[in-house]
Amino acid sequence: MRIGELAQASGTTTKTLRYYEQAGLLPAPERTITGYRDYEPATLQRLNFIRRGQAAGLTLAQIREVLHVRDAGAAPCHHVRELLDSRVHQLDRQIADLQALRETVTELRDAAAEPDPGACDPTAVCRYL
Amino acid sequence: MRIGELAQASGTTTKTLRYYEQAGLLPAPERTITGYRDYEPATLQRLNFIRRGQAAGLTLAQIREVLHVRDAGAAPCHHVRELLDSRVHQLDRQIADLQALRETVTELRDAAAEPDPGACDPTAVCRYL
DNA sequence: CTTGACCTTCCACCGCACTGGAAGGTCAAG
DNA sequence: CTTGACCTTCCAGTGCGGTGGAAGGTCAAG
């Protein structure tokens, strides 16, 4: 299958597929006599895996590593579990940070909700931030 | 005050101060005869404002706009309130998204917690993701 | 007078995941 | 034979908030 077909089938673009190849996420496919990339249908599974990994918030570098474990013939289950686990912890930290920030910003906003411009110090920028 | 002093006083770097000037966050300061930047002490307030804005998760572009309103002689309170308000909504969305993602990733992780590599389809990448 | 810390400008680069565009080759339909 | 869709490579740019480094000028202390 040609790159355009694969792009359409996987819901991405030809640009992205070439980029993935260059980034080591997709193996270099066979070529036709005239140099066109000729993908195996199984590449679609690989792309779906990449998409699921991205949906879980993994980076392409992390996904690439899993794929390489797989390509080396090993089952990447353990590696995947570790990645997902550290991702959960990272999400917990991010959520907590954002919630704390939300508190702070809400307080600032409420203080600024009924602004009294006359009370502002003209030498300061804004007393509500 | 010279750029190094201001950097130290504000807890940033000379690089960043020059960058802020180029980015329109700091006005071009006076220069000494030999070309050194010579800042007014009030610049420190401005930098603190920038830092508070960043801490609230505002972008430099947003902060710059507030500063420009201020520089034009107006009180930016109203503008600041709108920014903070939209930031709160943005944070709410981000938090909700991350929480949903955390659910999904946790489920995937738990499914992978006791992996059974033998049950894996060797043609797929990993049945746990 | 020299040393070392400080300052200047300018240009390029970081990560991340692409995206755009130029210049040229290939293929199938009409 | 031409047209237009598709493909190739290569180089460069996006956004964000800086950071690194080179080449050169300035200043105060010893």
Image: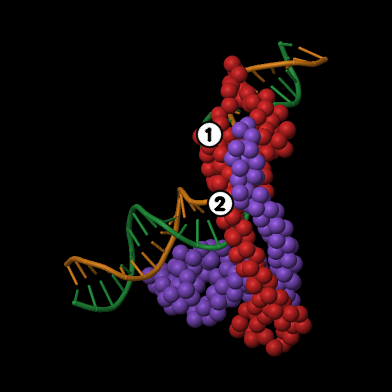
Chain colours: A red, B purple, C orange, D green
Residue at 63% x, 38% y: name it: B119
- Viewer-closest of B6 and A37: A37
In terms of secondary structure, where does tag 2 sit? helix
Q: Residues within 10 Å of mark 2 (few under 14, many from 20)?
A: some
In terms of secondary structure, where does tag 1 sit? loop
Can you identify the residue that label 2 sits on? A82
- Which dot marks residue B39? none
Q: Residues within 10 Å of mark 1 (few under 14, many from 20)?
A: few
Residue at 62% x, 68% y: name it: A97
Q: Position of residue B104 (x, y in %)?
A: 70, 53
Question: Is residue A80 something one can see in this rendering?
Answer: yes
Residue at 74% x, 80% y: name it: A110
Q: Is residue C10 above or below residue B39?
A: above
Task: Determine which quarter of the picture holds residue B81.
Answer: bottom right
Q: Quadrant of the C terminus of chain A?
A: bottom right
Residue at 63% x, 31% y: name it: B123
Q: Position of residue B19 (x, y in %)?
A: 51, 63
Can you identify the residue that label 1 sits on? A73
**Label 2 with label 1: CB-CB less than 8 Å:** no
What amino acid type is highlighted by mark number 2? Glu
Q: Quadrant of the N terminus of chain A?
A: top right
Q: Position of residue A95 (x, y in %)?
A: 65, 65
- For marks 2 and 1, the one nearer the N-term is 1
Query: Which chain letter goes with mark 1?
Result: A
- Viewer-closest of A113 and A48: A48
Say whether mark 1 and mark 2 are on the same chain.
yes
Q: Position of residue B108 (x, y in %)?
A: 66, 50
Query: Which chain letter goes with mark 2?
Result: A
Furthest toward the bottom, the residue is A119
Q: CA distance from mark 2 to mark 1?
A: 19 Å
